[in-house]
C-alpha cells in the first residue's frame, strides 16, 4: 500500500473538489466575462467560491483575487505593493526563511533599487517579534512574513509583529504567505492585522493551478499581469472556473472541522515522534510548538536523496524540503542552526488529519531499514 507523507508539497484532491471541477468543465463551461447566460453561470460559480474563501478568513468577497497559485500571489503582493508604495520608501523587510517565491522576488527587487532586510532567527533558533519591528522604519514600504515555515513547521510571530507595525507604522503594508497555515491553523485577516494574504488550493485538497491573494480594502497593489480587466484589473487573464470551483468546494468541506483536524494532527505528530525515539541516529528538527502538519527530521547522516529513493522503493513518499527546490538545499535549515551532515540528511514528513497511524508505522519501519542499509 502506498504511504503518502508529502502533503506540504501537495494534497490529494477531495471528491467534492474533483466533482466541482468536472461540473464546471462539462456543464458551466462559459467564459465568466461573457455577457450571455453561459458566461453568467460560470461567473456565479466563481462568485460562490470567492465568497466561501472570503468567509473562511473573515474577509469581504471583494477582497479576494484569484491567481494561478501562491507563487503568483506572493509575486503580486511583493511586486504590486512595492510598485505602489516604493517610489519614496525603498525598504522591504522579510524573514530569512521565506519560500523561494518571496525570497527570489525580494532579491529581484534589490536589483531594482530596493533595500531588503532579511530577519534571521537568533542563536536559539527562534524568531523574535522585536527583531522584525526594529528592522522597520520610516523608509519601509512592505514587510512579508510566512505564517508557517514549509520546511520545518515553525510558526512565525506574524500576529505580534503585524499588530505592532499597524500601531506604530501604519503606512507599512503587511503581507503573509499563509500556504501552510490556511485551513490548518486559524487564519483570520483581522486577527493577523494583514493587508495581503497569499493562499493556495492544492495544499488544502483542492486542485493545482489556482490560488488567491487577499487585498485589504484601501491597500494599493499594482498589477503584474496586464491585458484584460479580469479580477478588477488586478490580475488579467480568463479565470480558471473549474479550478476556482474546486478551491471553493475544498474550503466548504473542511472549514467546519479545522479545529478537530488540528487536534487529530497533534495526536499524529506525537505518535510519530514517540516511534522515532526508538530509531537510533534520528534527530528532530521541527520545534515542539510548530505546526503538527510538518515534521522535519535528520536521518543519522544518511543523505536525504538516497534515503528518499530507498523509501520510495517501499512506496513511502516523503521529501527533503520544499518541492519547489527540486531536492536542492534552500538554506532554510541553516537559518535554524541545522547544518552540515544533519542538514544533508533532512527529511520532511507532512501529514493530514486523514493520515493513519499505520502509515506512520510503515514510514518508521522503512526508515529503520534505511538507516541499516543505506550508506551515508
Image (spheres, rainbow, N blue to C red):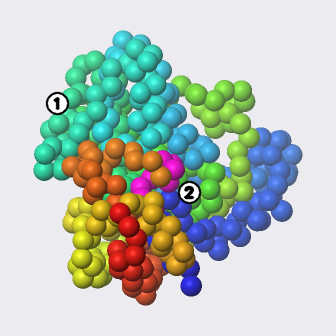
Kindly identify which numbered label has been placed on residue 134: 1
Which badge, 2 or 1, comes first in the chain's sequence? 1
Q: Main secondary structure of the magenta part?
A: loop
The residue located at (50%, 67%) in the rendering is 309
Q: Secondary structure at mark 2?
A: loop
Report whether 216 appears left or right of 277: right
- Quarter the N terminus occupies: bottom right
Report, in whole angstroms, how far the alpha carbon at label 2 lies from the one at label 1.
34 Å
Q: Position of residue 319 (x, y in %)?
A: 45, 62
Q: Magenta stretch: give its range.
A: 319-326
Vertical comparison of 158 with 104: above or below: below
State yes or no: residue 312 in magenta: no
- Relative depth, front residue between 171 and 202: 202
Q: Secondary structure at mark 1?
A: helix
Vertical comparison of 245 with 252: above or below: above
The residue located at (62%, 45%) in the rendering is 68
Disc 2 marks which residue? 201
The residue located at (32%, 78%) in the rendering is 272
The residue located at (45%, 41%) in the rendering is 100
Q: Position of residue 316 (x, y in %)?
A: 50, 75
State yes or no: residue 322 in magenta: yes
Amino acid at each position: 500500500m502506498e504511504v503518502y507523507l508529502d502533503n506540504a508539497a501537495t494534497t490529494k484532491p477531495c471528491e467534492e473538489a474533483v466533482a466541482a471541477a468536472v461540473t464546471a468543465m462539462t456543464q458551466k463551461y462559459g467564459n465568466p466575462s461573457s455577457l450571455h447566460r453561459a458566461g453568467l453561470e460560470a461567473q456565479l460559480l466563481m462568485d460562490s467560491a470567492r465568497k466561501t474563501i472570503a468567509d473562511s478568513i473573515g474577509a469581504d468577497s471583494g477582497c479576494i483575487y484569484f491567481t494561478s497559485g501562491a507563487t503568483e500571489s506572493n509575486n503580486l503582493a511583493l511586486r504590486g505593493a512595492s510598485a505602489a508604495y516604493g517610489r519614496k520608501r525603498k525598504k522591504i523587510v522579510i524573514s530569512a526563511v521565506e519560500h523561494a517565491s518571496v525570497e527570489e522576488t525580494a532579491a529581484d527587487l534589490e536589483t531594482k533599487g530596493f533595500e531588503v532586510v532579511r530577519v534571521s532567527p537568533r542563536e536559539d533558533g527562534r524568531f523574535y517579534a522585536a527583531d522584525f519591528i526594529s528592522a522597520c522604519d520610516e523608509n519601509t514600504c512592505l514587510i512579508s512574513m510566512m505564517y508557517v515555515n514549509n520546511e520545518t513547521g515553525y510558526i512565525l510571530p506574524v500576529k505580534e509583529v503585524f499588530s505592532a507595525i499597524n500601531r506604530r507604522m501604519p503606512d507599512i503594508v503587511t503581507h503573509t504567505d499563509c500556504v501552510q497555515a490556511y485551513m490548518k491553523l486559524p487564519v483570520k485577516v483581522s486577527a493577523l492585522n494583514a493587508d495581503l494574504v497569499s493562499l493556495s488550493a492544492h495544499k488544502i485538497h483542492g486542485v493545482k493551478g489556482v490560488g488567491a491573494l487577499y487585498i485589504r480594502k484601501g491597500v494599493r497593489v499594482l498589477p503584474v499581469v496586464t491585458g484584460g480587466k479580469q479580477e478588477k484589473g488586478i490580475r488579467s487573464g480568463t479565470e480558471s472556473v473549474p479550478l476556482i470551483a474546486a478551491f471553493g468546494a475544498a474550503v466548504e468541506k473542511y472549514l467546519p472541522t479545522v479545529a478537530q483536524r488540528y487536534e487529530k494532527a497533534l495526536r499524529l505528530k506525537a505518535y510519530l515522534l514517540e516511534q522515532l525515539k526508538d530509531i537510533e541516529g534520528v534527530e528532530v528538527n521541527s520545534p515542539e510548538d510548530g505546526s503538527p502538519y510538518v515534521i522535519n527530521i535528520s536521518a543519522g547522516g544518511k543523505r536525504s536523496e538516497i534515503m528518499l529513493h530507498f523509501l520510495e522503493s517501499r512506496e513511502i513518499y516523503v521529501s527533503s524540503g520544499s518541492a519547489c527546490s527540486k531536492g536542492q538545499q534552500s538554506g532554510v535549515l541553516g537559518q535554524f542552526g541545522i547544518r552540515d551532515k544533519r542538514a544533508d540528511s533532512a527529511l520532511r514528513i507532512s501529514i493530514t488529519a486523514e493520515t493513519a497511524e499505520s502509515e506512520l508505522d510503515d514510514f518508521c519501519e522503512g526508515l529503520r531499514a534505511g538507516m541499516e542499509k543505506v550508506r551515508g
